[in-house]
Image (cartoon, rainbow, N blue to C red):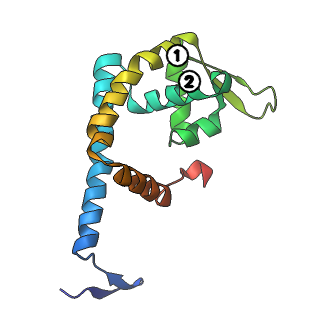
Amino acid sequence: MSDTVEHEGDGELRWLNGQEKAAWTGLISLVLLLPGKLESPLREEHGITLFEYLVLSHLSEAPRRQLRMGELAFLASGSLSRLSNVIKRCEQRGWVVRAPDPADGRYTLAELTDAGFDIVRQAAPTHLRAVRGLVLDSLNTADQKALARIAEKMRIVPDDFA
């Protein structure tokens, strides 16, 4: 098969070469399989999803353990709609409270409660073991820098923030 074919309406279509195919299949495998592998121990040991952990963790690291919902959605790489649903569940569990931002009432703040902070503190070692075991420990310093550089180049911003 030729490297290019004429594709109706799109002009020339370039097929993947061997190196491109290896890069693509490696990436898509990571994208599809890694989240489940990272989430499994969090669900089993703490009853939370990976996205819930990321949300709570970002709040735990924020000044006064609070962030605007939009900023939190961006940091956790989720849409505002998905974040809103997760925050609602976290509120029901007593882990988060929401309130209007006193600096600008058009925004809503999510704030981590002491109970929410306890969940993050309990789940952090579980998450860290998974991150190290599945990702970081198999990479040397140069690989880690390359991964960070590639991730930054490929950063996808949720539609809510595009």
Q: Amino acid at mark 2?
A: Ser
Say if 140 sits above or below 12 in the image: above
Q: Write the residue at 25% across / 60% down.
A: 25
> Which quadrant does the C terminus fall into?
bottom right
The quarter of the displayed image where residue 4 is located: bottom left
Q: Residue reaching furthest front?
A: 141
On the image, the x and y values in percent for residue 127 come to 36, 28
Q: Nearer the viewer, residue 84 or 70?
A: 70
- Residue occupied by mark 2: 60
The quarter of the displayed image where residue 5 is located: bottom left
Q: Is residue 93 visible?
A: no
| Residue 104 horizontal side relative to residue 135, left or right | right
On the image, the x and y values in percent for residue 136 come to 33, 42
Q: Earlier in the sequence, mark 2 or mark 1?
A: 2
Q: Residue reaching furthest left?
A: 1
Q: Amino acid at mark 1?
A: Phe
Say if 98 sits above or below 50 in the image: above
Q: Nearer the viewer, residue 92 or 135?
A: 135
Q: Write the residue at 59% across / 48% down.
A: 160
The quarter of the displayed image where residue 58 is located: top right
| Residue 13 horizontal side relative to residue 87, left or right | left
Q: Nearer the viewer, residue 47 or 120?
A: 120
On the image, the x and y values in percent for residue 7 come to 34, 84
Provide the secondary structure element on which disc 1 rests.
helix
- Residue occupied by mark 1: 117
> Which quadrant does the N terminus fall into?
bottom left
Q: CA distance from mark 2 to mark 1?
A: 6 Å
Mark seen at residue 59: none
On the image, the x and y values in percent for residue 30 come to 29, 49
Provide the secondary structure element on which disc 2 rests.
helix
Tag 2 and tag 1, C-beta contact below 8 Å: yes
